[in-house]
Image: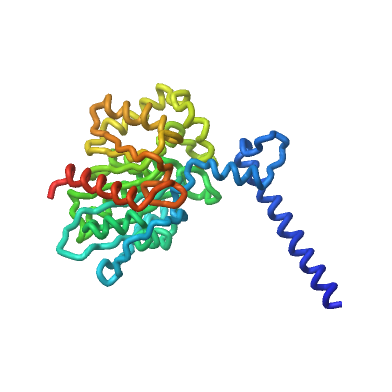
Amino acid sequence: MMKTSLTAFLVLVASSAFAQSQQQLADYLKRHPDADVNGDGRLTREEAREHRRRDPSRGDNLASVSAIPAINIPLAKAPLTQVSLKSADGVDLSFAYRTPQGDGPFPTIVFFHGGGGQSNLQGLKNNLLNGVVQTRFLQKGYVTVQSTRRPFWKTKDAGKPTGFYDAVGDAALVVEKVRALPAVDPHRVILYGGSGGGILAIVTASKAEVACVVAGEPATVVPIDPRTGQAAGPADYRKLMEHPAQKYTPERQKEMRAWMKVIDCPVLVLQGKPVGLYRTNFEILIPEMQELGRDISSISYPGVTHGFYWGTAKTGATLQTVERLVQDVDAFIGKHTRK
């Protein structure tokens, strides 16, 4: 009797898990109809897995894991502090930072995570403690700040306005707060972002006083097609990345040039293999800003893919890649900041 009951229970659990799995696949298909490669109206686990693998944000979010070790800097030597902050409409913009040893004020890097979402405070703290790039800049004597913002697109929380330019306002508010911190040299605040955080860092420089910006493969696709108030995600921009000029209408050009022309600090773009977001940046972002007389340059790192600027796994980044990148960025910052 006991054996029969246990068998029935296991069958019930397995059936429930299968139904849940099928529902997850159906929900994924609704969000990403292009994942149905054979067009039969049903999504298999293999099709979903392959679609996620092609997601242009892969390797560029707070959950990414690196095979390259971070620099272990004890909290006793570089304490971690959290700062409470809210936007005028109530979005939680609380952030965390670490301060190096020595006499300040220090040059300061505000890190903007990738993707289009919002991170919780624990995720921000983890990046300051375990981030490959973050800990190396802390070791070099920078205050390291890990920030977040509201999502770029519509989410389940419909109570708060959602949009890329709303997120830019959030980021500018964070920068303003950072510049007032006692350990920070307000004349040497640098923005460093990747992908969605990369384009966020660049546009934020049009609204906040910063010394320079470093952007790892910025997701210029977002301001080209902001999708304000719509449910969206990085994978929805795949076609735009292949033909960005089709969406870069005169109206969109006017809108984007409005913030490009007021950026008065140097911008450095970090680029891996010339795929993915490459065309939007090297056919639109960089030429447009240069035409407007802005100081924008790039450095290429052969053989690595999206997310390499965090030193994350599966991007091809090695310890040597990270060390070269940190050296390049540190030299760029040193050139464009006053001591």
x and y percent of residue 122 in the render? 42, 63
Residue shown at the point (24%, 43%) measured from the top left:
212
Picture quadrant where residue 142 is located = bottom left
Residue 256 coordinates in the image, percent (x, y): 36, 30
Q: What residue lies at 23% left-to-right and 38% top-to-bottom?
A: 266
Which residue sits at x=45%, y=27%?
Answer: 244
Numbered disc total: 0
In front of the other: 143 or 305:
305
Q: Residue furthest top?
A: 250
Residue 151 in the image: state x and y as whole percent: 46, 47
* Residue 262 against residue 314 in the figure, above or below: above
Quarter placement of the N terminus: bottom right
Q: Is residue 301 visible?
A: yes
- Whole-percent x, y for residue 159 in the image: 50, 50
Can I make out residue 221 in this image?
no
57 displayed left or right of 125: right
Q: Which residue is situated farthest in the bottom direction here?
A: 2
The correct choice, above or below, for 226 with respect to 293 in the image is below
Residue placed at 39% from the left, 46% from the top? 308
Residue 9 relative to residue 63: left or right: right
